[in-house]
Amino acid sequence: MELIVFEQDKAYVQRSLENGEIDYMEVASEGAETEFFQYLNTHGILQQLADTYPLKRVKPEVPVWLYIASDLSLRLHGMQSFHGYPLVIRTGGLLNALGPKVGKKVLHPETKQITIHCPGFNSKNKYDRETPCDQDFLRKTARATPAEKLLRWYNTEVPGLLKREALFDPEGIFIGDASYVFVPDNENYEGSVVLLFDEHNRPVDKEKLSPGQLRRCRYRRCYKWVELIHTNRAGEFFFFVAMHLGSGKAHECPILYELVEQFLKMVGPGVMKWLIVDRGFLDGERIGHLKTHWNVDTLSGLKSDMNVLEDARGLVRLEPVEWQDYHPPKPPPPLTRAKPETIIRREQARQRTLKAQGRWSEPPPPEKVVAFNDLTSWESCPVPLTVVLTQQSDKPPWGLVSTAHTQDAPFLRERYHLRETIGERHRQTKLFWDLTGFHSPNFNLVTNQVVFVALSYTLLQMQLLRENRPELNRMTRRTLQHQMLPYGNHIIVYVREYYGFFDLPEYTEIIMGITEPAKSKLLKKVRRLRRDFLGSMKRPRAP
């Protein structure tokens, strides 16, 4: 079956309905998931992903685009098990976007309940299908896709889609990070390792802990997950452009720079201009290579024992320096509904009272920062460096290092603050990868979970950014899942490759205004649809 692209065009569908010309209609729940898959279809993204998917079947009976759409739908709903597919199909918005040829609502002849009837893509089933494809087909396809090829596919297709859709921000800010994917404590998980973690899920060394600290730690089985993220200075989007999944004991530094190199070769120069990393990714040779070959400036925190940091501190002690003020940017206000004027005035009066009584908290004083250029004491780095020091009250100043040549210390401090401010959001996103309830130890299936969660999250971010709704991109895991819930019951009418949603009073008004010969034409079509609704299922499964 070809992938049919259904586009929402309510005006066209209404004109066709008034002329008695419809293909199908049913009661449907309008929701964000329908809009999401409509975006993928109309932009050709779903078909492109299917055309390049790394697994090619000898007999491709079920189309690849349906497998990808189904897997995306499962991840959007937070389902780890493929056995949740029937529930997602019944409650989600995927079928609304794919249209009645993939599946439609009918009456179960035994239970008299509304269910889904799908024609399917082959004649192997003895019973009527209630999902577009079997959940076991999804599992087998995921298991048969080699993990290495799936990761390579993701790292190729996502940057290509972002470049084609012109969604790379011109400032070119990218963030490198590493984390852990936790799985059940089962030694059969291929390539997994057991490490000791503290209460914040950070790996720790047992020999360096006190007995009290050790009691708060626990051993967990895990994989190492390294990712490259694209964002802008306001944190309005969060694209996973490349990733790697492997042994928890693998060092993340060479893995990240290999991902960066592959990304730059794919998209070309000028897309990435800044790479922001933490101290675990300090590699002078790699940082110098990015500057000299790709003109990419790296920004990172410095380790306390590095010579270049001691040199900058020595300059502070030897000569008077001009400290600059740095004011951390305020977080964006939370999304709220418009409030009545009386409530706004009441809140303003409350704030004035608190300020008059001295109970209103003042903003913290600015941080004091200073920049030193052309430092060369990092022997492994072939380019001169800029170090930014930030004062601390009772400790020596801590430092940032960058290959960018600038005296604007607040600028570099603010750019690094971007990594700090998205930390909570990144932590929420990582919760998607907690696979402690995922019971298959097959590494291909584990990789499938990670890749398709990242893909669904990134594609949803692309949709919201393209539709100029960046404020909705600051959503946590729970908010994201709530966005997938239906938000209204409507009559959905399909005509050719278009569909439209109508509320019940609106639809009734249109129907009552139809005159002959369109009325008879529509009545004939509706009677046929009702016969299909009542009698499509000939051999239903037992309730």
Image (cartoon, rainbow, N blue to C red):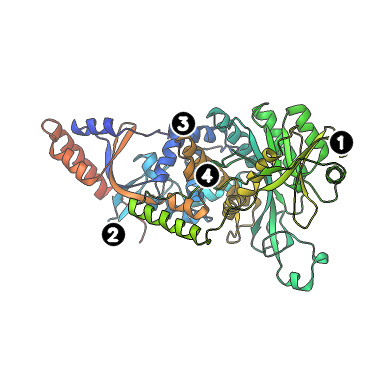
Determine which residue is flagged by label 3: 43
Number of numbered discs overlaid on the protein picture = 4
Q: Residues within 10 Å of mark 4 (few under 14, many from 20)?
A: some
The residue drawn where x is 15% and y is 31% is 518
Of tags 4 and 2, the one toward the viewer is 4
Cα distance in 3D space between marks 1 and 4: 44 Å
Q: Nearer the viewer, residue 21 or 314?
A: 314
Determine which residue is flagged by label 1: 376
Of tags 1 and 3, the one toward the viewer is 1
Residue 65 makes an appearance in the image: yes
Cα distance in 3D space between marks 1 and 3: 49 Å
Of tags 3 and 2, the one toward the viewer is 3
Is disc 4 placed on a helix, strand or loop? helix
Is disc 2 placed on a helix, strand or loop? loop
Cα distance in 3D space between marks 3 and 2: 41 Å
| Mark linked to residue 456 | 4
The relative height of residue 307 versus residue 111 in the rendered view (above or below) is above
